Amino acid sequence: MSDITMIDAAAARLAGHARRTPLLTSPFLDEIAGRPVYVKAECLQHTGSFKFRGAWNAVSALKPAGVLAYSSGNHAQGVALAAKLHGIPAVIVMPADSPAIKLANTRALGAEVITYDRATVDRDALGAKIASERGLTLIKPFDMAEVIAGQGTTGLEIAEQAAEAGVTVAEVLVPCGGGGLTSGIALALAARARGMVVRPCEPEGFDDVARSQAAGQRLRNERLSGSICDAIITPETGDLTWPLLRDLCGPGLVVSEDEALRAMALAHDRLKIVLEPGGAVALAAALFRPGTGPVIAVASGGNVDRAMMARALAT
Amino acid sequence: MSDITMIDAAAARLAGHARRTPLLTSPFLDEIAGRPVYVKAECLQHTGSFKFRGAWNAVSALKPAGVLAYSSGNHAQGVALAAKLHGIPAVIVMPADSPAIKLANTRALGAEVITYDRATVDRDALGAKIASERGLTLIKPFDMAEVIAGQGTTGLEIAEQAAEAGVTVAEVLVPCGGGGLTSGIALALAARARGMVVRPCEPEGFDDVARSQAAGQRLRNERLSGSICDAIITPETGDLTWPLLRDLCGPGLVVSEDEALRAMALAHDRLKIVLEPGGAVALAAALFRPGTGPVIAVASGGNVDRAMMARALAT
């Protein structure tokens, strides 16, 4: 199980390797929200999302001879770059029908991409076979203590940067898929910023975390695809992340796809940062849901294609 | 005349008020350029450009009762916010064809905006007249020692951040209009990073600095409007900035509007930052002009209308 000691150890491993991303503000966003808004710009992290933190920490801590990951998105790029910088091979197992640009980006970061036919091939069996044959270590996208600890370093930085801005009591809104980032931040803030409450943020139709919190038990999303917020569409939270989300977090917030797109456009206009829809749901909740006192929104990723950004800018 | 002592004093005044903007990288940009590329993301500065630095320093140092500025937009916002935060009034004289976002933002930051026709009216004369009538202190956009010193703090940060990344010998490319940012950075690096050479970057058709350097004397632009790089089209450099550009800088680089738009799209894709065309010319030169060894491009501003960003994303 992850704890603050593991997060501190992760921060030491990440020092000089991960970026200390800025905490941005704009008086125009404060006016929209009706309260002070702070944005932790993890889109500026290496590979364009927070995923590099957990990937770097896992690779650095476990010292594997090589790594394997399943992902067509941000986790793939984080693992690929972390492995490359450690000088070890990375194999990323991706569906053959993944977008060409995602296949190309993952390969360009030095990973070997193995594609499979998602209609006929069992991904887990294929991955296990490759890992076994080649002696590779599986790096899970969220339900892994080293990964949660790595993502939790975002929370350490939030606590420090908010305190520098004079903020010690705040809501901290976090885009939530499997819950690695949210639970890591919640662990860090429970230890270092007791006045802050973490709230998971999700898109409509994929609000398994908010529903699970309300029900007091882990629930699944009914649909597994069909959202522009692809980065945070996960069937359910993990065995490690769910108890942390249940015990450490305030109630989840849910926003529409249109609100996520509007938050992307406002981040473009007012903060000069590029967000993907899934990375913008916490900012959307900060801007468009009522609340009092300072609110800190984690902008978790910016890996958006040009057409989707153009769509956001047309809202 | 500005010098390193004034820049150090400016850095002390700006501490805790201006952002220390990150120095960003992407392996994808390195591959395009064929050499390591570092991007100083001043678009993330307060008001979306480096201009806040010089404005804050001038207002903080001179302690005026009220200020006036004439500006195509970024200087306007910088002065407006600096004045607002110092609790003094600001009048801004702006071209009528400034991007709508810049006009609206300047007013929203509490300034009184007076517009004029860029092609027919001498803004210096108009600004001096209003300042005299109302008893305001003119904050010039570039040819003012306190402003140059404020912009020069960007150079101090570049020297420190590049050294942290192991870079002490590099070309430093800077978008150049009147030359306040370029000459301030050149002064800072001449004192603190002797291995770095500053090169001004301009759009085609508005390359007065490159032509002036080649001719050994200050020349003017023939046209005074008609570029998408509105932030950096200035009739000529200043009495203070020209000698610094002439004596401290390497040869200027010139890029096309299309190259600036392509650099904006690549900054979107690879760095997750929003640049305006004029703020992207140095990155364009870094990516699309040959060179050896590390190159540091200053991304000087991100105040771009949504329509212009959509145009860049369609390139």
Image (cartoon, coloured by chain):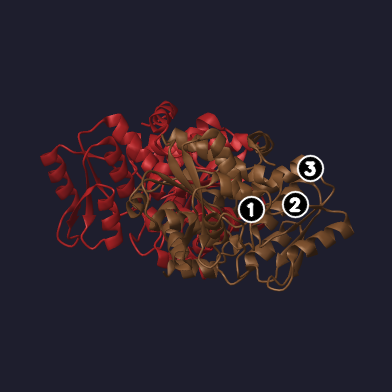
Chain colours: A red, B brown
Q: Marks 3 and 1: CB-CB under 8 Å?
A: no
Image coords of residue A159 (percent x, y): 55, 35
The answer to whether residue A140 is visible is yes
State how far apart marks 3 and 1 are (Cα).
Answer: 21 Å
Q: Quadrant of residue B57?
A: top right
Q: Are marks 3 and 2 on the same chain?
A: yes
Of labels 1 and 2, the one closer to you: 2
Crowd around label 3: few <14 · some 14–19 · many ≥20 (10 Å):
few
Crowd around label 1: few <14 · some 14–19 · many ≥20 (10 Å):
many
User: Label 1 lies in what chain?
Assistant: B
User: Label 2 lies in what chain?
Assistant: B
Going by the image, does B195 lie left or right of A126? right
* Circle nearer the N terminus (1, 2): 1
Instruction: Residue at 76% x, 40% y: name it.
Output: B61
Instruction: Residue at 57% x, 45% y: name it.
Output: B247
Going by the image, does B187 lie left or right of B61? left
* Circle nearer the N terminus (3, 2): 3
Instruction: Residue at 75% x, 45% y: name it.
Output: B59
Residue at numbered disc 3: B62
Up-down relation of residue A204 to residue A77 (above or below): below
State how far apart marks 3 and 2 are (Cα).
Answer: 10 Å
Q: Quadrant of residue A134?
A: top left
State how far apart marks 1 and 2 are (Cα).
Answer: 17 Å
Image coords of residue A24 (percent x, y): 57, 47
Going by the image, does A135 lie left or right of A313? left
Q: Quadrant of residue B215?
A: bottom right
Residue at numbered disc 1: B47
Residue B139, which numbered label?
Answer: 2
Q: Are marks 3 and 1 on the same chain?
A: yes
Instruction: Report the amino acid beneath label 2.
Output: Ile
